[in-house]
Amino acid sequence: MRNHLRVLRAERGWSQAELAQRLGVSRQTVNAIETGRYDPSLPLAFALARAFERPIEQLFVPDEG
């Protein structure tokens, strides 16, 4: 699954650490999600959507094929 978190985070001027603090996770978790090494749990995906004030569908894009 691909995502747009890095772009959305940069638009707000948030560091990975700042986003992690807002979500209650580690900076390493944010990095792993952004780089596609880790897919977030459903509760974390909803928390990300709330943080960015966007629907989940605008944050995450399923891989094709």
Image (tube, grey):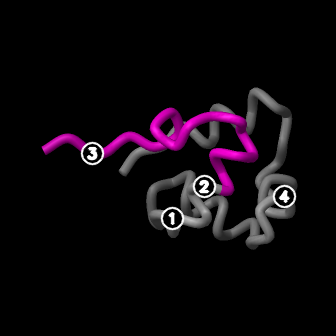
Q: Which residue is mark 2?
A: 46
Residue located at (66% from left, 51% from top):
48
Q: Nearer the viewer, mark 1 or mark 3?
A: 1
Q: Nearer the viewer, mark 4 or mark 3?
A: 4
Q: Is residue 62 magenta?
A: yes
Mark found first going from the N terminus, 4 or 3:
4
Query: Mark 2 and mark 1: span between their CA atoms?
Result: 6 Å
Q: Which residue is mark 3?
A: 63
- Where residue 37 sits, quadrant-wise, is bottom left
Q: Secondary structure at mark 1?
A: helix
Q: Secondary structure at mark 4?
A: helix
Q: Which residue is mark 4?
A: 22
Q: Is residue 16 left or right of residue 64?
A: right
Instruction: Give the numbered dot on residue 42.
Output: 1
Q: Write down the region rendered in magenta.
A: 47-65
Q: Nearer the viewer, mark 3 or mark 2?
A: 2
Q: Nearer the viewer, mark 4 or mark 2?
A: 2
Q: Is residue 40 left or right of residue 27?
A: left
Mark found first going from the N terminus, 3 or 2:
2
Identify the amino acid type marked 2. Answer: Phe
Residue located at (59% from left, 66% from top):
43
Mark found first going from the N terminus, 1 or 4:
4
Instruction: Give the numbered dot on residue 24.
Output: none
Horizontal and vertical percent for residue 56?
52, 43
Q: Is residue 64 left or right of residue 31?
A: left
Task: Identify whether 32 is placed above or below 63.
Answer: below
Query: Mark 1 and mark 3: span between their CA atoms?
Result: 17 Å
* Mark 1 neighbour density, 10 Å: few (under 14) some (14–19) many (20 or more): few
Q: Are marks 2 and 1 in contact (CB under 8 Å)?
A: yes
Mark found first going from the N terminus, 1 or 3:
1
Q: Are marks 4 and 2 in contact (CB under 8 Å)?
A: no
